[in-house]
Amino acid sequence: MLQSLAGSSCVRLVEQHRSAWCFALLVLGYLLYLVFGAVVFSSVELPYEDLLRQELGKLKQRFLEEHACLSEEQLEQFLMRVLEASNYGVSVLSNASGNWNWDFTSSLFFASTVLSTTGYGHTVPLSDGGKAFCIIYSVIGIPFTLLFLTAVVQRIIVYVTRRPVLYFHIRWGFSKQVVAIIHAMVLGFVTVSCFFLIPAAIFSVLEDDWNFLESFYFCFISLSTIGLGDYVPGEGYNQKFRELYKIGITCYLLMGLIAMLVVLETFCELHELKKFRKLFYVKKDKEEDQVHIMEHDQLSFSSISDQAASMKDDQKANEPFVNSQSPTSNDSSLNN
């Protein structure tokens, strides 16, 4: 008997705080996923980093042995300066000196990566004025970009998602939830094909040292706005039609970002995902909402009545003074 009472009380407690428990599980799951990613990346990439360090150490030692007139300090100072310039997108290599980082097309590409928060990091402002302008430009431009993307996606999704689903639901009598799921999967497949697979194949042809996996990796990193910057198109030696190529990449990134947002919004409108998201939201108490609404209505009604009364008083005060005769005087004048 006591066990059944304790079990029922525990179940009742869990049901009352279901949203809090789901949120706690969500936080725990996110932290575990974060740790899982760190463990996998460390186990996969750490051996390659160790091999690269050993290789660079051997190359440095061999170079010093072949050039005895050069001290290690002088070599390290030169390498530090080269690496510092490389972080700003400037290279001393003879096969990379022909490309300017701040011509108009490169600046347009940089501005698009800043406003979309992709930020490859291969090109950064060199001067203090450029850094200050980048801050001001981003503060204004990033919210402006979010507003622009929201407005565009809101208009596109009506014709791409809502009307097709409603058409098949009304015209053919299919279940709206089933149609929405199938439509979301088809739309996702089309988006992956048009903005990931096909562009990856094109990049693997246009970029000499990129294979298909590296090109697909660039497309995903770019359209997901991660922007690691390890792969940047149009930076190769003697790139043909580089200006036109940069403009095309800028248009691709903007259109791909819009397509990604349309797909995400389509999936978010699925009934099953809406129910799943509600598990982690704070549930509002209906009685408290009704009380707040009634208090707001009472306050607004009282304020309106007070304003009306004050307006009437002002009108009376502004009216010209008129001597009104008393009723008795009017009666006496009529009798006379």
Image: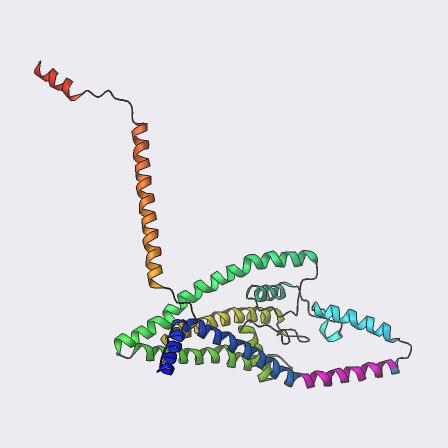
Q: Using the image as rendered, state which of residue 96 and residue 324 is in the foreground.
A: 324
Q: Is residue 62 magenta?
A: yes
Q: Residue at x 32, y 44 (%)?
A: 302
Report the quarter where the N terminus lies: bottom left
Report the quarter where the C terminus lies: top left
Q: Is residue 316 above or below residue 300?
A: above
Taking the view exactly as shown, the residue that stands out farthest to the top is 336
Can you tell which quarter of the image residue 159 is in? Answer: bottom left
Q: Position of residue 165 (x, y in %)?
A: 33, 75
Taking the view exactly as shown, the residue that stands out farthest to the right is 69
Confirm whether residue 96 shows in the render.
yes
Q: Residue at x 41, y 68 (%)?
A: 156
Q: Position of residue 268 (x, y in %)?
A: 41, 73
Q: Position of residue 145 (x, y in %)?
A: 51, 62
| The magenta segment | 46-64
Q: Using the image as rendered, state which of residue 58 and residue 217 is in the foreground.
A: 58
Q: Is residue 178 magenta?
A: no
Confirm whether residue 265 shows in the render.
no
Q: Using the image as rendered, state which of residue 30 and residue 88 is in the foreground.
A: 30
Q: Residue at x 55, y 79 (%)?
A: 32
* Left or right: 33 in relation to 174: right
Q: Is residue 217 above or below residue 91?
A: below
Is the stretch drawn in magenta largely helix, strand or loop? helix
